[in-house]
Amino acid sequence: MAFVAAGRLKRSGTGRKARKARVLDSMSSLSDAVPEFQFNCWIGVVAPCGMPAITVGKFRDALAAAMRVPALAATLTANGAFAHPTTPTEFRALLVRDIEATRRTMRSACIEPE
């Protein structure tokens, strides 16, 4: 959002129709123009396969607590982002869904991996 405010980046729309951040209120959703369009940008943390569940749980809890720190939450909100900690199972489902959506998009646009 800092680039938009500085005039260095032009915004044309947001990829999320539902749950837009207040900072994006004046921006239409790209799915209004292209109904099939959906793009979600997210950041995730992964761990090596076989990491003990207790360790994964402790790390997840610490990360979720960090997302609730007021200064970090304010920075995320100011940039149109949302903290949405998930469980490993939920995150895996998100990955699978997004990979399949990207495959469908690539096929429909006749894009082939090299």
Image: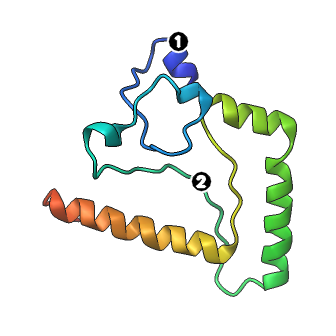
Q: Which residue is drawn at 53% across and 27% down?
A: 25
Q: Residue 22 vs residue 18: left or right?
A: right
Q: How crowded is mark 1: few (under 14 residues within 10 Å), some or many (20 or more)?
A: few
Q: How crowded is mark 2: few (under 14 residues within 10 Å), some or many (20 or more)?
A: few
Residue designated by label 2: 43
Marker disc for residue 47: none
As shown in the figure, which amino acid type bears the numbered disc 2? Ile
The answer to whether residue 111 is seen in the rendering is no
Q: Residue at x 67, y 28 (%)?
A: 78
The answer to the question of whether label 1 and label 2 lie on touching residues, with beta carbons closer than 8 A, is no
Q: Is residue 37 above or below residue 1?
A: below
Q: What element carries label 2?
A: loop
The answer to which of 43 and 16 lies nearer the viewer is: 16
The answer to whether residue 35 is seen in the rendering is yes
Question: Which comes before the other along the chain, label 1 or label 2?
Answer: 1
Residue 21, percent from left and from top: 59, 35
Q: Residue at x 39, y 36 (%)?
A: 29
Identify the image quadrant of the N terminus: top right
Q: In which quarter of the image is residue 50?
A: bottom right
Residue 52, percent from left and from top: 79, 85
Q: How is the image coloured?
A: rainbow
Q: Which residue is drawn at 58% across and 21% down?
A: 2
Q: Furthest residue to the left?
A: 110
Marker disc for residue 6: 1
Residue 31, percent from left and from top: 33, 43
Q: In this view, does 27 lie above or below 69?
A: above
The answer to which of 37 and 56 lies nearer the viewer is: 37
Q: Residue 107 vs residue 85: left or right?
A: left
Q: Furthest residue to the top?
A: 7
As shown in the figure, which amino acid type bears the numbered disc 1? Ala
